[in-house]
Amino acid sequence: MEAGRFSIVVGDITQSDAEAIVNAANTTLLGGSGVDGAIHAAAGPGLLEECRTLGGCETGHAKLTGGYRLPSRYVLHTPGPIWRGGGHGEAALLASCYRSCLTLAAEHGIQTVDFPSISTGVYGYPMAQAAPVALRTILDFLSDHELPRQVRLVCRREETAAVYRQAWNLWYAES
Ligand code: AR6
């Protein structure tokens, strides 16, 4: 993979200038709290109207909508797994969220994608365990695909970014 295609940043994903941002949604796709609430608030009512037509989304899958009043042109909605101790396929489902979003982005010719830290808020996935799954899945995808050209992990808090950076350093040390 070309250096510079992936980065970890601290910020508010609703302000992102990426072509697509990812929403850590729930299976109804009808909004909620956390980053989901922030994205719907910033996008305005048009987003919810479009989401109502989608018939929900399974955990680990993804659906694409417009970005409405967001700076981003698209939103990729993906419901992450709820943490139930780790023995219920959570890691595979979390990896599937990242892969599904990246696959959908590539299919639509999307050049730049920003992800939040899926499942690590309301859904309770421990950060230290989510970070290596997220990292490995994104970096594996980028090494096999030309699109998206650039992917960022946008963390609301510096502590979250630090956990992802540590996982990234470990990934480099191992590969
Ligand atoms: N920009 C970037 N990251 C953010 C922002 C933001 N504006 N706001 C929060 N985060 P969560 P989940 C971070 O709870 O665990 C909703 O109700 C936050 O600090 O938003 O996948 C949905 O409808 C955390 O690190 O998503 C579902 O029901 C990360 O985003 C449920 O929550 C994810 O936290 C999904 O839970």
Image (cartoon, rainbow, N blue to C red):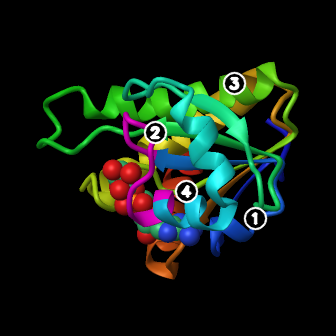
Occupied quadrant, residue 12: bottom right
Question: Are the residues flagged by discs 1 and 2 in contact, CB closer than 8 Å?
Answer: no
**Mark earlier in primary sequence (3, 2):** 2
Q: Is mark 4 within 8 Å of ligand 1?
A: yes
Q: Which residue is mark 4?
A: 116
- Packing grade of label 1 (10 A; few <14, some 14-19, many >=20) is some
- 10 left or right of 128? right
Q: Which residue is mark 2?
A: 29
Would residue 147 be counted in the magenta stretch? no
> Magenta segment, which residues?
25-36
Q: CA distance from mark 1 to mark 3?
A: 19 Å
Determine the residue located farthest toward the bottom in the rendered image: 158
Q: Nearer the viewer, mark 4 or mark 2?
A: 2
Please say whether residue 175 is visible from this viewpoint.
no
Tell me which residue sits at (27%, 33%) in the image. Answer: 90
Q: CA distance from mark 3 to mark 4?
A: 17 Å
Q: Which residue is mark 1?
A: 16
Q: Secondary structure at mark 3?
A: helix
